[in-house]
Amino acid sequence: MIFEIDGKRPKIGDHVFIAPTAVIIGNVEIHDGASIWYGTVLRGDMDAIVVGEDTNIQDNCTVHTDYGNPAILGDRVIVGHNAVIHGCIVEDECLIGIGAIVLTGAVVKKHTVVAAGSLILENQSVGPTQLVAGTPATVKRTLSTEDLPRLKKPLENYKHLSLLNFGIRLLDPSKRSE
């Protein structure tokens, strides 16, 4: 469901999958190749929401804003099931784990992994290239060059799933790596 509010209608790029039970409201811009999954709400009624290219926002997530605090998600970001992204910035190629919460004014810098269930506090900045976890989140370690390619697998999986919704099959499922 896509709704205009206060004269602002969502702008949606090419090859974007939006699940039929997702809700996209107001000042929202979704770039090419992104996917918004079942039960997710992007509510751009107080400020802008921007979703970068090939970013996937998985089932039952909430993305919202505060006045003066847009929610900006960079390119190739993975937002795990039930996460809350609120008036913050998540730079390119980050992973926000299942059930994580990123609060107003926070910045998650490039190549950062926010572990499942973690809480990024208001105005907290984490990264780049770190694994953060806990409530509130603290740095657990710096990600190595061996860690970074592992972020690509979930991106590939969700890209494949979103294209299937357009009737496009990239690979025979039996040939896909686990």
Image (cartoon, grey):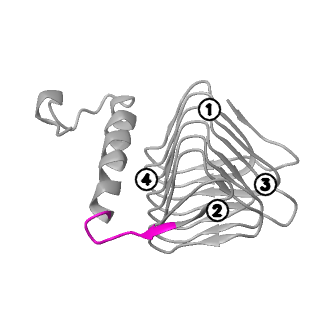
**Disc 3 versus disc 4: distance between alpha carbons?**
21 Å
Q: Secondary structure at mark 1?
A: loop
Assess disc 3: are there few (<14), some (14-19) or many (≥20) residues with their C-alpha within 10 Å of its C-alpha: many
For mark 3, what is the residue? 65
Magenta includes 176? no
Query: Residue furthest toward the top?
Result: 21
Q: Say whether disc 3 or disc 4 marks the residue closer to the N-terminus.
A: 4
Magenta part of the chain: 140-147
Residue nearest the observer in this picture, 56 or 44: 56
Q: Amino acid at mark 4?
A: Asp
Label 3: state its secondary structure.
Answer: loop
The residue carrying mark 1 is 60
Residue wearing tag 2: 72
> How many angstroms separate mark 4 from mark 2 (CA)?
14 Å
Foreground label between 2 and 1: 1
x then y, percent, for residue 4 = 78, 41
User: In the figure, is residue 68 to the left or right of 56?
Assistant: right
Q: Amino acid at mark 3?
A: Thr
Camera-side residue of 116 and 7: 116
For marks 1 and 3 on the same chain, the one whose residue lies earlier in the sequence: 1
Query: Disc 2 and disc 1: Cα gap in Å?
Result: 18 Å
Q: Are marks 1 and 3 in contact (CB under 8 Å)?
A: no
Mark whose residue sits in front, 3 or 4: 3
Q: CA distance from mark 1 to mark 3?
A: 17 Å
Residue at image x 55%, y 32%?
Answer: 59
Please indicate whether residue 120 sits to the left or right of residue 144 in the image. right
Q: Which residue is mark 4?
A: 54
